[in-house]
Amino acid sequence: MAGDGLVLRTARAEEAGELARLESACWPSGLAASEEQIAARLAAYGDGQWVAETAGRLLGYSSAQRIDAELLDSHPLTYRTVTDCDRFTSTHASDGELYQLVGVSSHPSHRGQRVGRQLVDLQVARGWSLSGVHKVLGFTRPAGRHLLPAVPLSEYVAAQNGGSSTDPILAFHLAAGAVVVSHHDQFRPDDHESLGAGVLISYPKPNPVSGSGGPAVSR
């Protein structure tokens, strides 16, 4: 757990630059969202942009949008098409039936303290609480695939489901109850760790738990 002072809240427009610096510290080169892209996300759907902070310091950032199901029928189906190049300007739909988890970042100095886990859990619960949302899903990264370049994507993903191999990012989601829906080669070509692949996962509706004991949540 992060410290007792951890607060989860929606991001503010003036924090776009700080969030871009946080992303740069968390993501491989070329994958972090820029200040301009984060500002566009905040303008398109501020309610889907959440941060974790303690003592005024931003430790984590989680991003989501609502989309229409038809967007997943795009050809080609790529990260650029389902996020409008990381901006959400043309992809977010205020009444979209799918709540799409786009990314989560937790500062390297606080890894292992469940900052990212708490942000994703909050996003999943929030997505399911919204009227008209039928699924909570997102494309995640098979980040260890570059270590097994000869293994086809279908076999690589099946190994994670079967427990015979552990990809750090897929394991993060699958251990929390997410299920694999489909997998896609050339989803994000500039993601070299994943050899360009993306894996679509879905989170089931969480069971209510009495007495959260978690971080403070504010708007």
Image: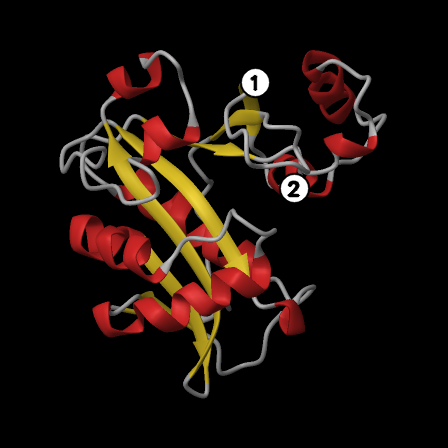
Question: Residue 56 location, x and y as percent?
Answer: 41, 85
Q: Looking at numbered disc 2 in the image, what kind of residue is underneath it?
A: Ile
Q: Looking at numbered disc 1 in the image, what kind of residue is underneath it?
A: His
Q: Residue at x 19, y 41 (%)?
A: 89
Question: Residue 26 location, x and y as percent?
Answer: 58, 60
Secondary structure of residue under mark 1: strand
Give the colour scheme of this rendering.
secondary structure
Q: Quadrant of the C terminus?
A: bottom left
Q: Residue 185, located in which quarter of the rendered image?
A: top right
Q: Residue at x 39, y 73 (%)?
A: 18
Residue situated furthest right in the rendering: 164
Secondary structure of residue under mark 2: helix
Question: Residue 154 location, x and y as percent?
Answer: 68, 12
Mark number displayed over residue 169: 2
Label 1 sits on residue:
183
90 shown above or below 182: below
Look at the image and tell me whether residue 47 can be seen. no
Question: Residue 84 location, x and y as percent?
Answer: 28, 35
Look at the image and tell me whether residue 99 can be seen. yes
Disc nearer the start of the sequence (1/2): 2
**Mark 1 neighbour density, 10 Å: few (under 14) some (14–19) many (20 or more):** some
In the picture, measured across the screen, residue 39 lies left or right of residue 189, that is left
Q: Residue at x 64, y 67 (%)?
A: 108
In the picture, measured across the screen, residue 156 lies left or right of residue 164, that is left
Q: Quadrant of the N terminus?
A: bottom right
